[in-house]
Amino acid sequence: MKCPFCNQDNTRVVDSRPADDNNSIRRRRLCDECGKRFTTYEKVETIPLIVIKKDQNREQYDRSKIEAGVLRACYKRPIPVLKINEMIDAAETEVFNREDREIESTIIGEIVMDKLKELDPVAYVRFASVYREFKDVNTFMDELKKILK
Ligand SMILES: [Zn+2]
C-alpha cells in the first residue's frame, strides 16, 4: 500500500484490529521511507487472501469455514457465543495481520488451535483431532495428556 505522505510503496502494518462495524479491519501502517504513520480501514471481503489447502488447491479465504470448525468443536460446551466470536475475531485478525496474499490452511489451523486452547480444552482437542488428522487413539491421548498436565 502506498504511503499518503511520500507515495512510496514501502509500508507495513504495525497494528491491525477489527473496526467497530466488524466488517472491516483498521490497520495502522508505518512507512519505512519517511517514518510516518497512517490508518486505513479495509473491508475484510476486499482484502484478497488466498488459502492454500493441503492438496495444494487454492481458494478464497472464507471466515465461515473457521466458524463452522470452531462451532463444531464447541458443541455443547459451556462457552458463551460472545466468547466464541471474540476468539474467531482474534484468530482472523492474526491471519490478516500477516499481510501475506496467500496463507496455508495449516497455518490458519494452528492459529485457531492456539486460541481455542485458551478458551476450552475439550473444544481444543476436538478441533485438533480433526485438524491434525490424528491417526489413532494413542496420538489423541498424547495430545490430551499434554494439555491436562
Ligand atoms: Zn512515506
Image (cartoon, rainbow, N blue to C red):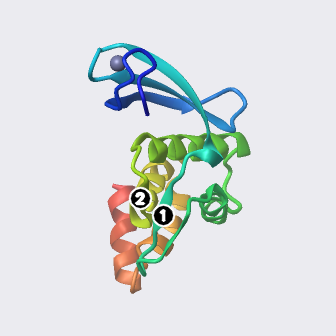
Name the amino acid, label 1.
Answer: Val
Q: What residue type is labelled 2?
A: Ile
Residue drawn at the location 39% of the way across and 44% of the way down: 98
User: Does 36 sit left or right of 25 as displayed?
Assistant: left
Quarter of the image with the N terminus in it: top left
Judged from the image, the quadrant occupied by ligand 1 is top left
Check the image and report above or below for 23 versus 49: above
Q: Counting residues from the N terminus, which is met first, the one under dot 1 or under dot 2?
A: 1
Q: What element carries label 2?
A: strand
Q: Where is residue 122 in the image (x, y as percent from the top left)?
A: 53, 60
Mark pair 1, 2: CA separation: 5 Å
Badge 1 crowding class, 10 Å Cα cut-off, few under 14, some 14 to 19, many 20 or more, is many
Snapshot quadrant of residue 30: top left
Residue receiving disc 1:
51
Residue 59 is situated, as x and y percent measured from the top left of the image, at: 54, 68
Query: Hey, which quadrant is residue 143 in on the image?
Result: bottom left
Where residue 149 appears, as percent x and y from the top left, is: 33, 55
Image position of 127 with respect to 48: above or below: below
